[in-house]
Amino acid sequence: MKVSSPVADDLCVRAGTLPASRGENQGSPARPQQRRKPAIIGPLAAYLRAHAVQLAHFVAVGATLAALNLLLLFFFRTRLHLSDPLAVTAMYTLGTVPHFVYHRWITYRAFDRPVVPQGMRYVVMLISNFVLMQALVALAARASLSPYIAVVVSNGCTMVANFLTMTHVVFARGRGEA
């Protein structure tokens, strides 16, 4: 069946002006719904732009220290033959000093502020990270998985939380500082 163009246009206009059924947008007729970005995208993009340099430093320092930690774990497990929980504890303990120093110095440039309050807030963050890491190492052992996998997963789990905690709590500047 062949339909002439004016008839087809009239049919489209009439169909577009029909009342909306339940659950549909009852706004303007014959206007296709526009897909909107979720409300979180704009503020998230602005936050990432505002903290881009810090984030780049955080990732670079974090990746370097993660490699160092995995090397330490390998050394403690293979050369010293420590059990996994003990090897992870030794690795974590030795890795915290350069982690704190490098993030304080490179990522957050917070070396001009008192170290003790920063250190105390940092220790609280470390304890929660350590508990998570030990729990994942224990779960990995029960599932016959490598502790290396548990350490990498733990780092992945804590990465975003650590960035936010260090940026806004541990190394946060006072209200009058730039």
Image (cartoon, grey):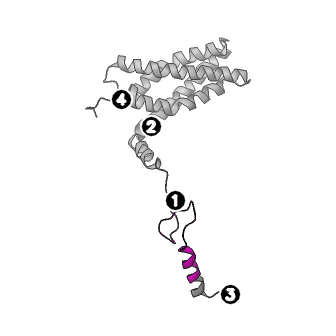
Nearer the viewer's eye, disc 2 or disc 3?
Answer: 3
Discs 1, 2 touching: Cβ within 8 Å: no
Q: Which residue is mark 4?
A: 172
Q: Which residue is mark 1?
A: 35
Q: Residue furthest right?
A: 144
Q: Nearer the viewer, residue 52 or 65?
A: 52
Mark 1 residue crowding within 10 angstroms, few (<14) / some (14–19) / many (20+)? few
Label 3 Cα neighbours within 10 Å, binned few <14 / some 14-19 / many ≥20 = few
Q: Secondary structure at mark 4?
A: loop
Task: Please give the residue where the numbered disc 3 appears in the rendered image.
Answer: 2
Q: Hey, what amino acid is under mark 1?
A: Arg
From the viewer's perspective, is the residue at label 4 or at label 2 nearer?
A: 4
Question: Would residue 132 be visible to someone looking at this image?
Answer: yes
The structure residue drawn at horizontal position 44% and vertical position 47%, both measured from the top left corner, is: 45
- For badge 3, the amino acid type reads Lys
From the image, which quarter does the N terminus lie in? bottom right
Which badge, 1 or 4, comes first in the chain's sequence? 1
Residue 5 is situated, as x and y percent measured from the top left of the image, at 59, 86
Q: Which mark lies nearer to you, 3 or 4?
A: 3
Q: Nearer the viewer, mark 1 or mark 4?
A: 1
User: Principal SS element in the magenta part?
Assistant: loop
**First-in-chain label (4 vs 2):** 2
In terms of secondary structure, where does tag 3 sit?
Answer: loop
Residue 57 percent coordinates (x, y):
44, 34
Label 1 and label 2: CA atoms lie apart by: 30 Å
Distance of label 1 from label 4 (alpha carbons): 37 Å
Q: Secondary structure at mark 2?
A: helix
Which of the marked residues, 2 or 3, is nearer the chain's N terminus?
3
**Residue carrying label 2:** 55
Secondary structure of residue under mark 1: loop
Q: How far is the residue under mark 2 from the one under mark 3?
A: 61 Å
Part of the protein shown in magenta: 9-37
